[in-house]
Amino acid sequence: MANIFRNQRPIVKVGIWILVGMIIVGLLGTTVAWYLSSDGEQQQPIAENPASEEDIIATEIERQEALREEYEEMLVSDPEDLTVLTGYARVEMQLGELYLQNQEESQGKEAFQRAVPLYQKALENEDDLQLRLELASAHQLLGDDGKAEAELNKILEQKPGNLNALAQKGILLESREDWDGAIQVWESVAKSPQADETTKEIVEARIKAIKEQE
């Protein structure tokens, strides 16, 4: 996979790794408004000092790599520790996102691949909806849409109105060019009592962009 997004049509090139990462921590809403426009194109913030931004990313990668080594050692000592498994998986996800920011897609993919079995092991110990959402994100970022959808459906079976799972499924269906399915899911997001006005505006923009694409 030389380029994770090579086969994506313009409508779904909305910084999926950024959006999924934000969904993971429940920040759908005001945090994503800056880069979703009505035509579905990615709007990147203008960095005042690109070189400084690169340095910050490089420093954070170094920090997360050091954390990864620490978690690796802790996991050897206690392979069943849920806290270690969860922390280790999240460090790998953070690394994956950072490497993608740094245009290092192969390293990003490797980090997401390492995260998957850690999440799976953690879920064997405890069925946690947030961890399952994060596992779905890892699968989705690796292009394993079928596995991602299966995890999202498990969440929605337990919590049909889970806003984060619905939003992530909407992104997934867009990536498949299942426009009708995506619209249906986005409409469910908009109707959710959990959706604030900014989230509803973003949903309206997604639906408008899809309809213009059809």
Image: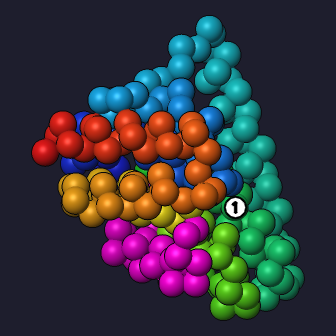
On screen, residue 204 versus residue 116, left or right, reads left
Tag 1: amino acid: Arg
Residue 142 in the magenta stretch? The answer is yes
* Chief SS of the magenta region: helix
Which of these two is toward me, 141 or 25?
A: 25
Residue 99, image x, y percentages:
55, 43
Residue 56 in sight from this viewpoint? yes
Which of these two is toward me, 4 or 153?
A: 153
On screen, residue 32 versus residue 141, left or right, reads right
Which of these two is toward me, 205 or 7?
A: 205
State the extent of the magenta-drawn residues as a range: 138-162
Residue 117 in sight from this viewpoint? no
Residue drawn at 36 percent across, 69 percent down: 144
Indicate whether 169 appears above or below 129: above
Residue drawn at 45 percent across, 79 percent down: 153
Residue drawn at 74 percent across, 49 percent down: 64
Dividing the picture into quadrants, the one containing residue 59 is top right
Q: Please, what secondary structure does the residue beneath circle 1 have?
A: helix
The residue lying furthest to the left in this view is 214
The residue lying furthest to the top in this view is 48
Residue 115 in the magenta stretch? The answer is no
Dividing the picture into quadrants, the one containing residue 147 is bottom left
Residue drawn at 68 percent across, 23 percent down: 55
Residue 34, image x, y percentages:
53, 27
Residue annotated with mark 1: 90
Indicate whether 174 appears above or below 148: above
Residue 21, image x, y percentages:
58, 50
